[in-house]
Image (spheres, rainbow, N blue to C red):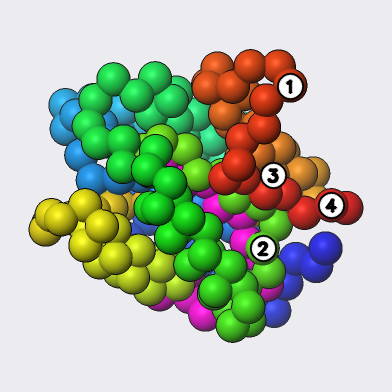
Amino acid sequence: MAFSQKYPPVVYKRRLPHIQPVGGTFFITMRLANSLPAYLVNELTADHQIQLRRIHKEFEEKSKKEPEKDWQKMKNLALSAAKEDYHWLFDHHLDIGTYGPMWLEQREIADLVVESIHFLQNKGIYDLFAYCIMRNHVHLVIGNTTQVLHQTLKSLKQFTGYRGNKILGRSGNFWQKESYDHWVRNDNALQRVINFSYYNPDKANLISNGEEWKYRFKITR
């Protein structure tokens, strides 16, 4: 699979910065509105910011002590690992599913999301590597994107949110505005996020041995 880096990164920011190069490969998690309590989100985000500041300070000190060494690669790896840890914590609390709506459990809504993911794939907006529809969130792995990622997510969320609300007979936010997205930079990382997405129902103990989770897909390589 190709990892294009011929386009300059686009940095998009709401709560947290996102690096979104056109042509990139991304691991995305979208969650339903209010699927986690605000105090928990604030707590996890604050802890993550402390960890990032610690990493920056640590490598700043190392650069002063040994300026002849190139610390940037190791710093980037540490920052990437911290971001993954931050996401795994979020995902753990979503998997527990003790707070907020579980609208994606409804067959009609899950079908809607799957059809919409494939619709954008068929339009050539991205290559689809994996997805998994959980009870209150969606994992999506896409590559070779033809537009800035937040534009794609905006289209996906607006359409499925509007239709989902009509099915539920409600109004208001369907999806949480902020999504998690991670720029996947190599083949090993890609395989890791594909497997994480696909096997999320197993990890969350939502299925027993021998059962199949209908709303998931991964590319055969």
Which kind of residue does numbered mark 2 sit on? Leu
Residue at 54% across, 74% down: 120
Foreground disc of the pair 1, 3:
1
Foreground of the two, 85 or 158: 158
Foreground of the two, 99 or 178: 99
- Please tell me whether residue 116 is drawn above or below residue 131 in the rendered image: below
- Report the number of discs: 4
Spatial CA distance of label 4 from label 2 is 11 Å
Which kind of residue does numbered mark 4 sit on? Thr
Q: Secondary structure at mark 4?
A: loop
Which mark is on residue 220? 4
Please tell me which of labels 3 and 2 falls first in the chain. Answer: 2
Spatial CA distance of label 1 from label 2 is 26 Å
Spatial CA distance of label 3 from label 4 is 11 Å
Please tell me which of labels 1 and 3 falls first in the chain. Answer: 3
Residue that label 2 marks:
128
Residue 187 left/right relative to 128:
right
Number of other residues with Cα within 10 Å of mark 1, as a class: few under 14, some 14 to 19, many 20 or more = few
- Please tell me whether residue 121 is drawn above or below residue 196 in the rendered image: below
Which kind of residue does numbered mark 3 sit on? Ile
Q: Is residue 108 magenta?
A: no
Spatial CA distance of label 3 from label 2 is 10 Å
Please tell me which of labels 1 and 2 falls first in the chain. Answer: 2
Residue 73 coordinates in the image, percent (x, y):
68, 45
